[in-house]
Structure formats: structure tokens, C-alpha cells
Image: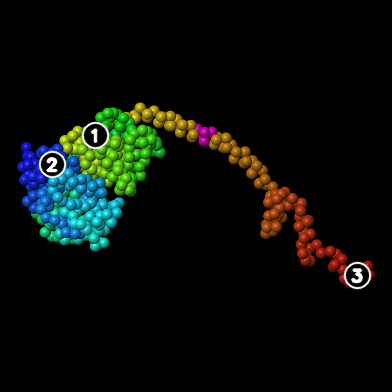
Amino acid sequence: MTKFSDLKLDSKILKAIDEAGYDSPTPIQEGAIPAALQGRDVLGIAQTGTGKTAGFTLPMIHALARGRAKARMPRSLVLCPTRELAAQVAENFDTYSKYVKLTKALLIGGVSFKEQDVLIDKGVDVLIATPGRLLDHQERGKLILNDVKIMVVDEADRMLDMGFIPDIERIFGLVPFTRQTLFFSATMAPEIERITNTFLSNPVKVEVARQATASETIEQGVVMFRASRKDRQAGEKRAVLRALIDGEGDKCTNAIIFCNRKTDVDIVAKSLNKYGYDAAPIHGDLDQSQRTRTLDGFRNGNLRFLVASDVAARGLDVPAVSHVFNFDVPSHAEDYVHRIGRTGRAGRDGKAMMICVPSDEKNLEDIERLIEREVPRLDNPLSQTAAPEPAAAEDNSEKPAKRTRSRSRKAPAPKAEEPVVAAPAPAPEPKPEPEAKQPEAPKDEPRSRGRGGRNRGNDRQDNNAQVVGMGDHLPSFIAMSFEERRAG
């Protein structure tokens, strides 16, 4: 078996490795470190949790042990997709460069620009950054990348998934063409091929596992869950999660619970705390200081359950995570590999369980197609609570019966009105005159609103008395001549 001492690393680095408790390199380290020490470009592909970080930090420390950085001009650059992964890489440098005088700076969001500017102005040997914050410093004229000798892109596929392709290409244009480039990733997407063909020069490809495979030390399972009613799905799904945790008992020493949406991360964490589980959320919308405190609490054992979005799926190195629970089936099959890779690390056993609702079954098929195996089905731990479903059906069956009875009462009503409608049908025939006076209907409107039309026939004389002018009822004395009236 190969030892770290066989890799021709600096003795000071070997001393730090020994104190960290490591003796033999992992397969990815054994393949990547010798090539990197020779100054070759490296394309490393390995499942998560296999030690990729040490695979590039160790040769970088060895290469940078001699020399000194100039102000604002770092000698090496490590790009990471998330703040958490960048912070972890920084911790690895602290661990392995304990006896080597190297300076480093961490450029991530959520931290004051001024504090980071102070570190850059002093000159750093190792610059660890997320792409966005790095470009912010460069655009402000605070950072010059002309002296970068080694460039690392960690979790390259995740960088591409998060839409960092334009940023990555721009950063490559800012560093010297003669730099050494190291690409490390858990999966190898077609886009990675294009990037590597463009920016890597005759790289040594180190692939220690089939693309997108899960560690054999991880026991997997999925609960095919169907809620009693659609509007109860969220609450019953959280109950299934609690039952899965309880079913593991003392074997579940700690766990990461993954959700697809940030809002669900907060809801699940709040729900677990409500039922007495020690849980805290972590996602991209939280303040960086809060995220750091939460991760530190989980690493040192003060926090048992970490409820996370995919921001925590990549690169988090907590060696002793006993369980991973996928509250949601990940939308991208590759994310499943990264999520469950948080457990079963460094040869340890781990367990990963997932809850799949009917709308997620296609995503589950994509995962099984990717990992080329079926995820074993688990029994629903709350299957005995399915009894209320028939009761709900009975309640629903009563409601139509009530509506049927109400219709039966109202059904005779139209029949009772039929003779009433038919009776007055012949009545209008002997009264043609009112029909002929339809143009005067506007005069009758007030009467129809107040008293109805019952007196229309009796009021005919009154209506005639209101005629203005010389009509058919001209008084006789008016028609008499003047002489006739005088004689009379």
C-alpha cells in the first residue's frame, strides 16, 4: 500500500499529515498528487468524500513553500462554488501548511470588503474565492491576477450548474497562460469536456470511480409516500420524516436533511424544533455569520440535525455524519450523489433515506438510471395511520346525499306554478285595448312598481281626462256658435 511518504512531499507537509491522523492517500490523491508535483495539468474525477481537497492542497503547498507573494498579486487561486466549500478548503490549508509559512485569504460574500482588502494588500500565497466576490475585487482594482502560477477549479460541475461558466471563462482570461490548472469534480458533464479542452493543456485524467456513483458503504432506501389528501401532503410528509428519524434510534447520531427549496428548509427546521428535535437551517439567504455558527455547531456535535439546501451538498467535510435524509427528491440526479455523499465518508458506514411523493417519481427514475441501480423501497413508517382515509371518504359521500334531498324538495315547485302560468293565458284576449296602448307603458312604470297593474282597466277614464287639446270628447258648449250662446 502506498504511503504519503512515497509521494515525495516536503517533510514539513508529511509531519502535518501525520499529526492530522492520515497515513495512506486515497485513490484520487495517489493519482493526482504525483502528476501535480510534476507541474502537469490534472483533471480529477471522483465521487464526493474521497479526499479531492487534499488532492490539490498538498501539491500546492509543496510548490508554494519557497517564494513570497507581492501585494495584490496572489501566487495561486482556488475557485469554489459556495462559501461553505471555500471555507473548508481554507481549513485544509491551515491543517496541512502548519509548518510551512504561507499566507492565505478567503474572498467570499457576506464579509466586509475592507477586511478582505487588508489581507490582499499584504500579499497572499493562496487566494481562495467564490467567482462573484473575486471579480468584484478585480473590478475595483484591488486584485491583480498576473502572478497566478497554480489555478484550481473545485467542484467544476457544480460551478457549471450554478451558471458560473461566463465568470469562469473571464477569470481564465485574467490569469497567465502558463499557469498550472487543476480541475476536480465528482461528475463529468459534457460542458466540462468543452471547458477542459479549452483551458487545460494535455491534462492527466485521474478517474477513480465510475461517473456519478454512490459509495458502496452507504445504505440507501426510499419511502414511496402518498398523502391521504393533497392539502395534507406537507404535514404528513414531515411526520414521515420524524418517524424515519425515530426508527433509526441511537444509530442516528447526527444527520443532514436536504430540501429542494429554501422556504422548505426553514419550515422543516422549525417543525423539527417544535417536536423536540435539535435542528437548525442553512441556506444561501442566511447571513454568513449565522451559517458559520450553524456549521460549527454541527461539526462539534452541539447540533444534531442540519436542515440544508443544496448549498451544503457539495464539499462539506463532516467526517462522522451517520445519516442523510432527502426530504425532497433532488431535481437533478447528480445532486443525489452529492447529497448522500455527506455520509459514509473516509470508509465509514452511512445511511441515506429519501421520501418520494408521486410528483417526484420521474426524478427518482432519473436517479436510478444515473447510479445504474434501483434504490431499495422502504415501508412507510406511518402506514398504520392510513385508516382515516376511508373516514374522509364517508364524510364526502354524505354531502352529495344532502344535496340530492334538497333538490327533491324543490323539484315540485315548478310543477305547482304551471297552472298559475296557464290560467291567465286566455285573459288578455277580451282586452285588446290595453295591448294597443303599449307605447304609453312608461307612464305605467311607477304604478307597476308600487301597486302592480290591477287597476289599469278601471283607471281608463282618469287617463282620458288628462288628454290635452281638442279630442273626441270636446264639450258641446264650446262647439256652439256665438249667436247660439247669446240666444241661450
Distance Cα–Cα, label 2 vs label 3: 147 Å
User: Is 62 left or right of 368, judged from the image as shown?
Assistant: left
The residue nearer to you, when weighing 372 against 129, is: 129
Residue type of the residue flagged with mark 1: Ser
Mark 2 or 3, nearer chain start:
2
- Secondary structure character of the magenta stretch overall: helix
> Residue 17, labelled with which disc?
2
Find the magenta span and give its range: 401-405
Q: Is residue 345 magenta?
A: no
Circle 1: is it few (<14), some (14-19), or many (20+) Cα within 10 Å? many
User: Is 447 left or right of 121, judged from the image as shown?
Assistant: right
Circle 2: is it few (<14), some (14-19), or many (20+) Cα within 10 Å? many
Residue type of the residue flagged with mark 2: Ile
Q: Residue at x 77, y 59 (%)?
A: 464
Q: Secondary structure at mark 3?
A: helix
The residue nearer to you, when weighing 84 against 228, is: 84
